Image (tube, grey):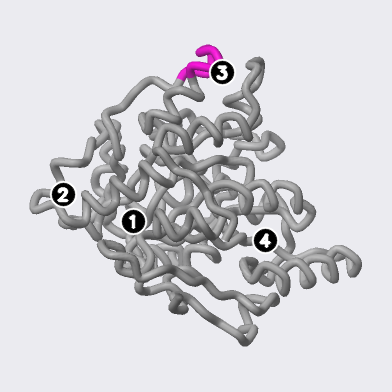
Amino acid sequence: MNDICHTSQPTTQFLVQKISFKSDDRPGLRGLVAVAVVSSAVRNFRERQNVRATWADPRVVRLTGIASVFVVGGTTSARAQRALVRESLAFRDIVQADFLDTYNNLSLKSLAGIWWGAQHCAQAPWILKTDDDVSVNVFALSEYLLHYAGSTEPEAALHMPTFTDNPDLRESTKRCTGAHCVVLCDKISLRARAVDNNSYQFGVSAAEWRLPTYPPYCHGVGYLVPTTAVPALMEAAATSTYIRVEDVFVTGILARAAGLRIAHMHPPVPWQYALHAHDRALLFIAGIRLTLELDRDLEGGRLTGSQVWRMLLERHNVTLDQS
């Protein structure tokens, strides 16, 4: 087992230390395929444990090459902070950013995780951003990324969305070609209306975003940023007006300002929440969708997240030993 990502000292940006990842040198897997930065809240110990017991299980990481780190913000509770430090020392998979863990700081949290991944896991070609209430089909994702990396025509594996006709959006896009210029998305929103209401969870003020619609963006439940593109993304963040709607800000506004495109990793399939929960789970297990929101997507159905995970293991003929 070789260390892939490691930092043993806190920095000015991060408060919790003892972060490290390990991965087998199995044939065909050179280190990590991707590092997942999982947005989490300080209080969400149960959600983190669920991720650790499923797609972030070390035995699964050895099979897929996709390791995970949880990204949290700061807390004003000394008791919660002590518990978080104990958890970090036990699992070595938590990064805590130096700002309060609030909804308004979600965009900062995602950028902090992406930046950390690029700084400490530069060997991994991709950084996956997801949330702690999401299950990831890491088996299908690993296969896709390995195929994409080994393809002589990686563009053929992409499914580009049709951008809006707003000239302001087109003019803001720089020219960029190659795999390092594409943000890979599980779900994409086109022509989403911007709500001018800061009291609304997904709202923004007119001063923050003046256009009636957002640029195309990846849903925050699952998108991958090329590690080599992170500096350009951070440069764009330094000169862009901040908005708290994380997925719009990072993959819609910043990605375009950095000259990055967004693309589906699979042919677009309507992800309608009117579908039965069982059907949504089957799409996930089949790899047609690579992420599953455990509460929202399974609502109204009989399947639990644990049952879906066992079905996914069976689908890929995976038996997890006890070693």
Query: What amino acid is at disc 1?
Result: Ala
In the rendered image, residue 106, in percent from the top left (x then y), is placed at 62, 53
Mark positioned earlier in the residue sequence (2 or 1): 2
Query: What amino acid is at disc 3?
Result: Ala
Q: Magenta region: which residues?
A: 272-279
Mark 2 closeness class: few <14, some 14–19, many ≥20 residues within 10 Å = few
Say if residue 172 shows up in the picture.
Answer: no
Mark positioned earlier in the residue sequence (4 or 3): 4
Residue 44 or 46: which is nearer the viewer? 46
The quarter of the displayed image where residue 177 is located: bottom left
Pointer 4: what residue?
Answer: 72
Pointer 2: what residue?
Answer: 154
In the rendered image, residue 261, in percent from the top left (x then y), is placed at 27, 48
Mark positioned earlier in the residue sequence (4 or 2): 4
Nearer the viewer's eye, disc 2 or disc 1? Answer: 2
Q: CA distance from mark 4 to mark 2?
A: 34 Å
Q: CA distance from mark 2 to mark 3?
A: 33 Å
The residue shown at (59%, 55%) is 322
Query: What amino acid is at disc 2?
Result: Pro
Nearer the viewer's eye, disc 4 or disc 3? Answer: 3
